Amino acid sequence: MATTYKSEEEIVQVVQGFESCVTGKDSFSHPDHLAVAVFYLRQNEKQALNLMRASLHRFLDHYDCRANYHETLTRFWILLVRGTLKGLAPGLGLLDATNAVVNRLNNSRIAFEFYSKECVESAAAKEGWVEPDLKPLELIGN
């Protein structure tokens, strides 16, 4: 398994940089999004989506690009990360769980296995939750 993150402290720094908007908007990578999702799900699974949504809003507002927020994709990725975590060996620490999730989901185009481009680009999907139009969510273990 490839190692994206070297320590739990590094993951915490990614989360803190994102939450405080110290991380540049072009520096916040797909693996970083996944690391934050794992962190939030491990911290409070029931509130992970709300935590991610609030943090993304703050981050996007800071960089004056709130129009980039996408509710369906935000919720989709939280569900996908949650399903992936549930499939991992019990008792994995934050570091190993995060690296396992990043290794499995380090392709931001995965969403297009579930959603058509037209669906993702729709106003309805950007503003609220839209069910996948290509493949059901049951396939991701949720």
Image (cartoon, grey):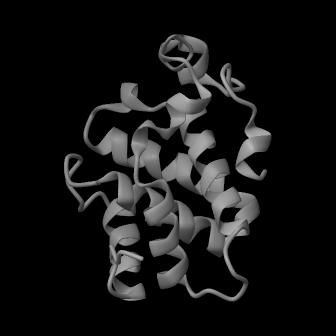
Q: How many marks?
A: 0
Left or right of 128 on screen, residue 121: left
The one of 122 and 48 positioned closer to us in this rendering: 122
Relative vertical location of residue 104 with respect to residue 94 in this rendering, above or below = above
Left or right of 74 on screen, residue 41: right
- Image coordinates of residue 28 in percent, x first then y, are 28, 54
Q: What residue sits 55% from the left and 18% below the top?
A: 116
Left or right of 89 on screen, residue 124: left
Q: What residue sits 54% from the left and 53% below the top?
A: 52
- Image coordinates of residue 129 in percent, x first then y, are 68, 28
Q: What residue sits 32% from the left and 85% below the top?
A: 6
Specify the quadrant of the image occupied by residue 22: bottom left
The one of 137 and 37 positioned closer to us in this rendering: 137
Relative vertical location of residue 30 with respect to residue 94 in this rendering, above or below = above
- Image coordinates of residue 126 in percent, x first then y, are 53, 22
Which residue ends up furthest to the front in the rendered image? 1
Relative vertical location of residue 91 with respect to residue 21 in this rendering, above or below = below
Residue 50 in sight in this render? no
- Image coordinates of residue 92 in percent, x first then y, are 62, 86
Which part of the image, by quadrant, shows the N terminus?
bottom left
The one of 23 and 80 positioned closer to us in this rendering: 80
